[in-house]
Amino acid sequence: MQALFRQYQAAEGIKGPTTLDGVGTWAIRKGLWAPQPRDILRQFTADMSKALREEFYTDPQGRRVRTKHPVRLPKKEQEEQVRLWDDIRRMSREHMETSAQQRRQGIVADCNHLQTDVDSFNDNRSLNNPIQISFDFRADLAELETERELLTATG
């Protein structure tokens, strides 16, 4: 897929930002990519995961809470990663604790990748004016909490 992306940019003479819709349309039109049955199932899984992540309800305290939470199971030989989804209103404490820890690990991994990308950009493109990133989210969380309380009070 990465080679296909580079091939598209070269064929179309694109050196800057590129949309994946453009790459996909080009690759399909040229017969360089076609969905396989496993791709269709993966697409369904991705669409369903997105839909479940976007399902919310209002808890008894008035908070907007994500309803469905996945837990990734350990991968076995020759198997795809398995995720078990459950509803927060009836899931076990163990399921919620595991899901929360896995989400936190994902956030940490995202922050680590972001820091690596920014460090590389700063070292190679912006030595005299480096981008500074803070990973202390306490002020952001407090601001969001204040906004939520204001909405609840005026709602």
Image: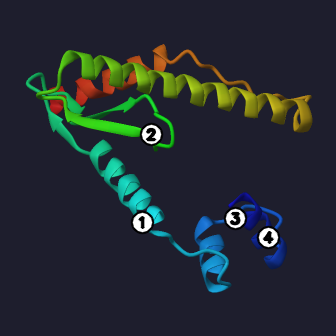
Image quarter where the C terminus lies is: top left
Give the mark, 2 or 1, whose residue is nearer the N terminus.
1
Three-letter code for the amino acid on which mark 4 is drawn: Gln
Marker disc for residue 81: 2
Q: Looking at the image, is mark 4 or mark 1 nearer the viewer?
A: 1
Marker disc for residue 7: 4
| Left or right: 130 in relation to 75 | right
In the image, residue 119 lies at what x, y percent? Answer: 79, 28
Q: Residue at x 30, y 51 (%)?
A: 51
Confirm or deny contact between disc 2 and disc 4 (CB under 8 A): no
Disc 2 from disc 1: Cα separation? 16 Å
Marker disc for residue 40: 1
In the image, residue 14 lies at what x, y percent? Answer: 80, 70
Q: Looking at the image, is mark 3 or mark 4 nearer the viewer?
A: 4
Give the mark, 4 or 1, whose residue is nearer the N terminus.
4
Q: Residue at x 42, y 60 (%)?
A: 43
